[in-house]
Amino acid sequence: MLFTAGEHTLSFTKTYHSLASMTYLGRELLTADQSPLFALRLRDEAGNAVHTSAADAAAVTVETESAAGTVLLYRFSEPAVRVRVSLSCGDGFVWHIAVENDTGASVEWIDFPNVTYPGALRESGGDAAVLWPYNEGALIEDSGCKRWLVDPEYPSQGSYPMFPYMVFSQFTVYLFGGHGIYMGNHDAGYAPKALDFANSDDSTRFR
């Protein structure tokens, strides 16, 4: 199903493992090789970590689907968790994720939603840039400037792009062709979170 919010459209792959397309005024905004829609890591009392993602789900159930949005339930065999993802359509696309965890381990972090936009940044021959609230704020226009993503670990490094710490706000923006995609965490509790991205020669991945 094609979902619409203002001038944007969005659709999932047939398996609902990732996004298939997102457009703005007819321009395709996603690469063909999207990462799984979400990923998560659990850690038990002994410190052992278990990773999983939407692509590992044993089954996906569409609980509701209409022009107003959708609710998807992802069931996993190992680890024994269920992940419910909701998408609401209005002035923009609003996402929510919840994890039902029966493993006895703790959910350490969740990556959601994972998206990769095509095209080089401005100083590398494209028309894109990243407005990133790191340190005092940065406008990234060189595709060679930031090539890495780092999973948070404990004890942590001082350079992690975490809020509230080195990242001072709960949003970032992908700029392209005179337009922008606002990606914000509307979390009134100000819980710790990472706002991270990585560039390649011809794309930018956010998580």
Image (cartoon, rainbow, N blue to C red):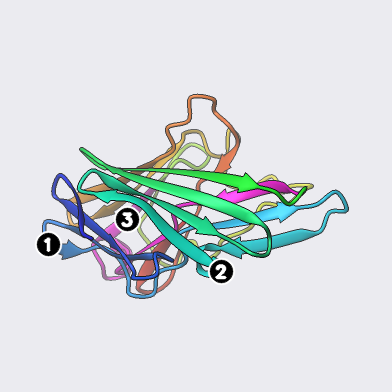
Q: Which residues are magenta?
A: 105-131
Question: Could one spot residue 147 in this view of the protein?
Answer: no
Residue tagged 1: 26
Sequence-first tag of 2 and 3:
2
For the residue carrying disc 3, how many other residues have a C-alpha within 10 Å: few (<14), some (14-19), or many (20+)? many
Secondary element type, mark 2? helix
Residue 129's tag is: 3
Sequence-first tag of 2 and 1:
1
Sequence-first tag of 1 and 3:
1
Give the quadrant of residue 27.
bottom left
Residue 152's tag is: none
For the residue carrying disc 1, how many other residues have a C-alpha within 10 Å: few (<14), some (14-19), or many (20+)? few
Residue tagged 2: 56
Distance of mark 2 from mark 1, alpha carbons? 32 Å
Secondary element type, mark 3? strand
Residue found at the far right of this picture = 46
Q: Amino acid at mark 3?
A: Ala
In percent of the image, x 36 and y 69: which residue is there? 203
Residue 39 spot, x, y in % from top left = 55, 59
Mark 2 or 1: the one toward you: 2
In percent of the image, x 25 and y 48: which residue is there? 180
